[in-house]
Amino acid sequence: MVKYRANNNIGMAMYHFHIADDHPLFRNALLEVINQHFDDAVISESSDLETTIKALENDTDIDLLLLDLHMPGSQDLYGLITVREKFPSIPVAVISANENGSIINRAMGHGASGYIPKSSSVEILHEAIKTVTDGERWLPAHITLQVSPITDEEKSLAAKIATLTPQQYRVLCYLREGWLNKQIGFELGVTEATIKAHITAIFRKLGVSNRTQAVIMLSHLSIEQDHV
């Protein structure tokens, strides 16, 4: 995790932002906006979900988390759901290259305070960040979307998925791809016995008894089907 004070000014920081994105160019764009418009802000960074969670555990005094939906370890809605479950007091603005209305609706339904397309101009980035730090929700004006509540079934499923550790979630994603325990263990650098233990824990947390049921549950939170 990288952490520093914008503008290198001395004194108490007005805001603490955390940028969680694996794309350096977009992180730099956000840094530029924050540097220009939020004097004395503390800015920390991470590039995958695991280090993001560790950063939030170490410092919960964060005014806004700018969270990429698709950084490593954060496929589908898992990253957003996990952060909202573990750190409900930290506002989250999703940043994504995907501008599909259904995905935006679901992200907002799972607790995002804003949804910022990566195609946004510097001016729009500033507007979005300021709006969310002011305690309001923000959506891009060009997206004509009536945000509607997600179903109780999806909320219940999200709560179960959020109990998985990042490693367990990775194992579940490999199960979705049809990988064998031995293949998963080799990929993750652990023994086959460890993978079996992870799968047992996954089944228990999700309340299922086999791989097929677990994969079906995960598919209900997939946003791949919402791609246009």
Image (spheres, helix red, strand yellow):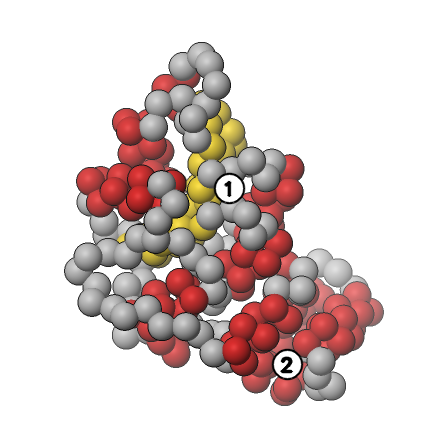
Q: Secondary structure at mark 1?
A: strand
Q: Using the image, determine if residue 26 lies above or below residue 215.
A: above
Measure the alpha-carbon separation of dots 2 and 1. 29 Å
Residue ID for mark 1 = 46
Q: Which residue: 43% across, 31% down?
A: 15
Residue 214 disc label: 2
Which residue ends up furthest to the top in the rendered image?
10
Assess whether mark 1 and mark 2 are in contact (beta carbons under 8 angstroms): no
Q: Which residue: 47% across, 38% down?
A: 63
Amino acid type at image mark 1: Ser
Amino acid type at image mark 2: Ala
Q: Using the image, determine if residue 216 lies above or below residue 49.
A: below
Picture coordinates of residue 22, whole percent (x, y): 44, 47
Quadrant of the drawing holding the N terminus: top right
Task: Give the left or right position of residue 177, taking residue 142 as reference.
Answer: right
Picture coordinates of residue 88, whole percent (x, y): 56, 52
